[in-house]
Image: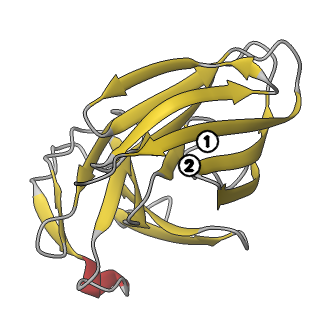
Amino acid sequence: GDQHGEVCPWWLNEIDIGFDHWFVLHHLNWSDADLPARKVAMADLGIDPAKSHLVYEFWTDTIFKLVNGELSAPQLEVKGLRSYAIREMLNRPQLVSTNRHLSQGAVDLESLRWQDNALIGRSRVIAGDRYMLVLHVPEGFTLDRSSFDGQAAEVKIDGNTARVSFMPKRTQSIPWKATFSKSVNR
């Protein structure tokens, strides 16, 4: 974008940190008028529209599933910004976002793995800045417990979304874990 001309309203980042891969689509409005709602086809972004994806909007703390391979971006107010993390949906609990940076994990996640029905990770946190993991918990799974450095985390569950957080006392790298149970269909 040219700082003295029109700024492109769409910016796409592809993030690949070895143990995880996702996209962040930024929609920005530097104009003097609202931008109308738009549909964005995942195929136009190089994202496979045949696969199911979860989308998390950073600034509004909203999670949703793509419909028909399209993102329905709402009207964007003057000087507005939306940052959509787009992750392929898995058939198990998964991390959808963190709240540390609009890259939604790229600057803070040091590790992440699924092992023994648990998401296990390590993140860089900042003293006095509440750190939050946004998790998708699909049907058939229940979040049993979660912790940061062995201490119980604050958990808020809203449908299939769990927000797991804590307030760091020190700036440091800290391990975390979210353990799930799986329902048995009979």
40 up-or-down from 109: above or below: below
* Residue 47 location (% of width, % of height): 36, 82
Q: Would you say residue 108 is visible in this rendering?
A: no
Colour mapping used in the image? secondary structure
The image shows a total of numbered marks equal to: 2
Residue in the picture at 21% in, 63% down:
66
Query: Compared to 114, does 16 lie above or below?
Result: below
User: Residue 161, percent across and down?
Assistant: 35, 37
Q: Is residue 54 above or below residue 138?
A: below
Which numbered tag is attached to residue 167?
none
Q: In the shown orientation, is residue 152 left or right of residue 154?
A: right
Tag on residue 104? 2
Q: Secondary structure at mark 1?
A: loop
Q: Nearer the viewer, residue 88 or 70?
A: 88
Where residue 168 appears, as percent x and y from the top left, is 77, 17
Kind of residue at badge 1: His
Q: Is residue 169 left or right of residue 180?
A: right
Residue under the image location 25 percent in, 54 percent down:
185
Q: Secondary structure under badge 2? A: loop
Residue underneath mark 1: 101
Task: Identify the residue at image location x=23%, y=57%.
Answer: 65
Q: Is residue 68 above or below residue 5?
A: below
Q: Nearer the viewer, residue 67 or 14?
A: 67
Near-viewer residue (48 or 40): 48
Question: Please, what is the three-letter code of the amino acid marked with disc 2?
Answer: Gln
Q: Is residue 42 visible?
A: yes
| Residue drawn at (25%, 33%) of the image | 159
Q: CA distance from mark 1 to mark 2?
A: 6 Å
The x and y percentages for residue 155 are 49, 20
Task: Tell me if label 1 and label 2 are in contact, CB under 8 Å.
Answer: yes
Q: Which part of the image, by quadrant, shows the C terminus?
A: bottom left
